[in-house]
Amino acid sequence: MKNISNVTAAILVGGLGTRLRSVVCDKPKVLAEISGKPFLAYLLDKLLTTGIRKVVFCSGYMGDKVEDYFGDTYDSLHLCYSREDEPLGTGGALRLALPFFSSDTVLVMNGDSYIDTVLNAYIDWFFEQRTKAALLLTKVDDTSRYGSVEINEDKTVAAFEEKRDNAGSGWINAGVYLLKRSLVSVIPMGKYSLEREFFPSLADGELYGFCSDGQFIDIGTPEAYSIAESFFTVRNHEDFAGM
């Protein structure tokens, strides 16, 4: 039987943020301010709605600033830190954090993107599938910046399409994953990518995709960061109107 409070969340916050340094140069991009609070706080606020209680930050570049800002707790969330000494990629950073995962299931989130969706519905669906790995997907009008994900009728991932110009609409990886701890343990130690190496290796019936209609933002570029305030302003107004 599932117990969401026992699911550990891992947030990947070790990126160098090279493309964003022209506008955010004195801090890691996950601490870039949106309406007076860091982007990462929006992810933590989302986790507070799920019942999850433990969050592991997979940190690296300027990781000390993340730890200094958030400390050991955020409301009811207990925070801990797995710090890489050199860039390990998303897969390597997650594998390094394995000793911090006390739960059988890990919810992994990219620290520089946000999707406006109900995470509990995704988590419930994952347990119903009885699978070891799943991606949260969302549909965008132009997949050129992200690449796209093809899925089968049974919701297994069929293939990943590389980034290309004039790609058109399609499903993209929204940067929120559910993985069994046993699967994380087989990720090689060292530099390794979830997106380019690990997930494609599972695209033969082992990896599922959960399709969401939630709005998505990735603040990895100055252009995307410039619209983040309006993105969250709209979200907050919609939430208030629905109360």
Image: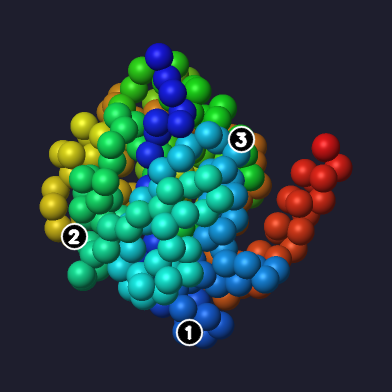
Q: Which is more toward the observer, 188 or 161? A: 188
Residue type, mark 1 in image = Cys
Q: Residue at x 52, y 85 (%)?
A: 22
Is any atom of residue 52 visible in this view?
yes
Label 2 is placed on what type of residue?
Lys
Residue 213 located left or right of residue 237 = left
> In the rendered image of this protein, does residue 43 appear above or below residue 120?
below
- In the picture, the disc for residue 191 is 2
Q: Quadrant of the C terminus?
A: top right
Q: Is residue 148 visible?
A: no
Q: Residue placed at 40% from the left, 31% from the top?
A: 6
Give the amino acid type for the residue marked by disc 3 in the picture: Val
Image disc number at residue 228: none
Q: Position of residue 86 (x, y in %)?
A: 21, 70
Quadrant of image for the N terminus: top left
**Front in this rendered view, residue 92 or 51:** 51
**Label 3 close to label 1 by CB (< 8 Å):** no
Q: Nearer the viewer, mark 2 or mark 3?
A: 3
Q: Which residue is mark 1?
A: 25
Q: Are marks 2 and 1 in contact (CB under 8 Å)?
A: no
Residue ID at (52%, 80%): 24
Q: Secondary structure at mark 1?
A: loop
Q: Earlier in the sequence, mark 2 or mark 1?
A: 1
Q: CA distance from mark 2 to mark 3?
A: 32 Å
Residue wearing tag 3: 118
C-alpha distance separating marks 3 and 1: 32 Å
Towards the viewer: 11 or 70: 70
Figure quadrant of residue 98: top left
* Helix, strand or loop status at disc 2: loop
Q: Is residue 169 above or below residue 124?
A: below
Answer left or right for 173 relative to 104: right
